[in-house]
């Protein structure tokens, strides 16, 4: 999942970004509202963690503009992170389009729990455990199991699998995966997506289990609920 952290307090923004990256998310940072809007025009973020008080364009206006003109037609979830703690401030934030509101100072564990909750809304799945066929991904404990055995995944493999499981049966192009699972420092001209998908698939089926991530020729990849489904247009 791709997240944008927006805060004019550079030290705080960078600390939040580092923490979210440790959780396996691809994170970009903006230190003012104008830069945030510029980045959001280029990248279809899944979530924006947004400060309210900024010197150029405040968070309320940024939120409104993110809602009004998202780059791919789907507005990102918005989690407002702010020191404004009155009821009126919370109402204003939510009325301007925020999905959630967290007051500074906050515990990082609460922030990550709210991030997981907001991102699960897009997945149309509840709880912190995603299940596809015999694969279980526990987002809270950062644990993946298949058929009862634990899988040792890198942070990026975990993030990629989480995205596949949140979009099961959808065909995802390499460009789409690069936008949502990698951050702005990823080189779009490398084969990093293909290589990571390949290592993830090997780990998922290293005990001989059926492959759940298939290659859709000319289009990308798809995770399927049942390996016995129609694969006429795919190469596993």
Image: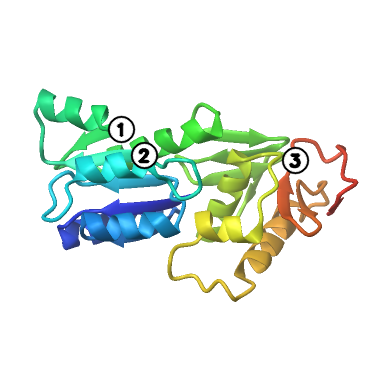
Judge whether 235 appears above or below 76 on screen: below
Q: Is residue 18 visible?
A: no
Inter-mark Cα distance, 2 to 3: 31 Å
Label 2: few (<14), some (14–19) or many (≥20) C-alpha neighbours in 10 Å: some
Inter-mark Cα distance, 2 to 1: 7 Å
Are dots 3 and 1 in contact, CB under 8 Å? no
Position of the C terminus, as image quadrant, is bottom right
Give the residue displayed 11% in from the left and 55% down from the top. Answer: 55
Residue tagged 1: 97
First in residue order: circle 3 vs circle 1:
1
Give the residue displayed 66% in from the left and 51% down from the top. Answer: 172
On screen, residue 218 versus residue 150, left or right, reads right
Are dots 2 and 1 in contact, CB under 8 Å? yes
Write down the quadrant of residue 225 in the picture: top right
Residue tagged 3: 224
Residue 67, numbered circle: 2
Judged from the image, the secondary structure of the residue bearing numbered disc 3 is loop
Q: Position of residue 199 (x, y in %)?
A: 68, 63
Judge whether 159 appears above or below 69 on screen: below
């Amino acid at each position: 999942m791709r997240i944008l952290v927006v805060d004019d307090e550079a030290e705080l923004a960078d600390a939040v970004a580092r923490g979210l990256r440790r959780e396996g998310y691809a994170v970009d940072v903006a230190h003012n509202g104008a830069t945030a809007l510029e980045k959001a025009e280029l990248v279809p973020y899944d979530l924006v963690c947004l400060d309210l008080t900024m010197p150029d364009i405040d968070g309320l206006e940024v939120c409104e503009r993110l809602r009004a003109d998202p780059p791919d037609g789907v507005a990102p979830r918005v989690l407002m992170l702010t020191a404004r703690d009155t009821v009126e401030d919370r109402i204003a934030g939510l009325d301007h389009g925020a999905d959630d509101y967290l007051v500074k100072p906050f515990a990082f564990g609460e922030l990550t729990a709210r991030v997981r909750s907001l991102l699960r809304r897009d997945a149309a799945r509840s709880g912190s455990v995603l299940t596809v066929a015999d694969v279980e991904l526990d987002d809270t404990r950062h644990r993946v199991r298949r058929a009862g055995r634990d899988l040792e995944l890198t942070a990026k493999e975990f993030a990629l699998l989480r995205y596949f499981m949140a979009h099961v049966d959808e065909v995802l192009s390499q460009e789409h995966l690069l936008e949502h699972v990698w951050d702005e420092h990823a080189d779009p001209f490398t084969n990093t997506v293909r290589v990571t998908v390949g290592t993830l698939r090997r780990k998922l089926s290293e005990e001989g289990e059926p492959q759940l991530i298939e290659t859709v020729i000319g289009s990308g990849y798809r995770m399927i609920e049942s390996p016995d489904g129609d694969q006429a247009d795919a190469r596993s």
